[in-house]
Amino acid sequence: MATDYDAPRRSEADDLAEDSLEELKARRNETQSGVVDVDETDTAESFELPGADLSALSGEDLTVRVVPKQADEFTCSKCFLVHHRSRLAEDNGGVYVCRDCS
């Protein structure tokens, strides 16, 4: 089939402009779905992990033992984590930087 490349091209907007009101109403009803949008956070809360008994954990108190910084440790001036002296990358007049941040 031969194509006339000089003829003006028709877009979808041109096709919609020529449709009758009844056709547009019918097309609108066809494209609407009965599915309701659901928030992902609501669906995530409804899932239960296998083997997880949340009722047993609800009364549990978690305790963490905090140990003060030791003599052979330093606090990195960039990431503010406490590291062992073997992780020291540079010491610029009391400004300590770990190997990860250097």
Image: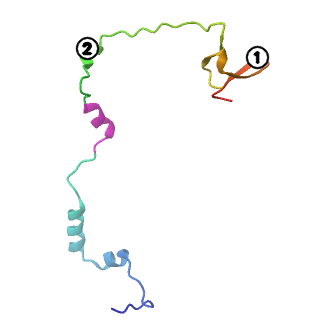
- Marks 2, 1: nearer the viewer: 1
Identify the residue at horizontal 42%, vertical 8% (top origin).
63
Give percent across and percent down for residue 84. Answer: 63, 15
Q: Quadrant of the C terminus?
A: top right
- Residue occupied by mark 1: 94
| Residue 34 appears in view | yes
In front: 49, or 6? Answer: 49
Number of on-image labels: 2
* Residue kind at label 2, given as amino acid type: Ala
The residue where tag 2 is placed is 56
Q: Majority secondary structure of the magenta segment?
A: helix
46 in the magenta segment: yes
Left or right for 27, reference 3: left
Which callout, 2 or 1, points at the residue further toward the start of the chain?
2
Amino acid at pointer 1: Gly
Is 28 in front, or is 66?
Answer: 66
The span shown in magenta is 38-47
- Please report the residue visible at 32 percent of the width from the left and 10 percent of the height from the top: 60
Residue 21 quadrant: bottom left
Question: Whole-percent x and y of residue 93?
Answer: 79, 18
Residue 75 appears in the picture as rendered: no
Most foreground residue, 37 or 23: 37
Q: In the rendering, at what x and y percent does residue 81 appear? A: 60, 20
**Which image quadrant: the N terminus?**
bottom left
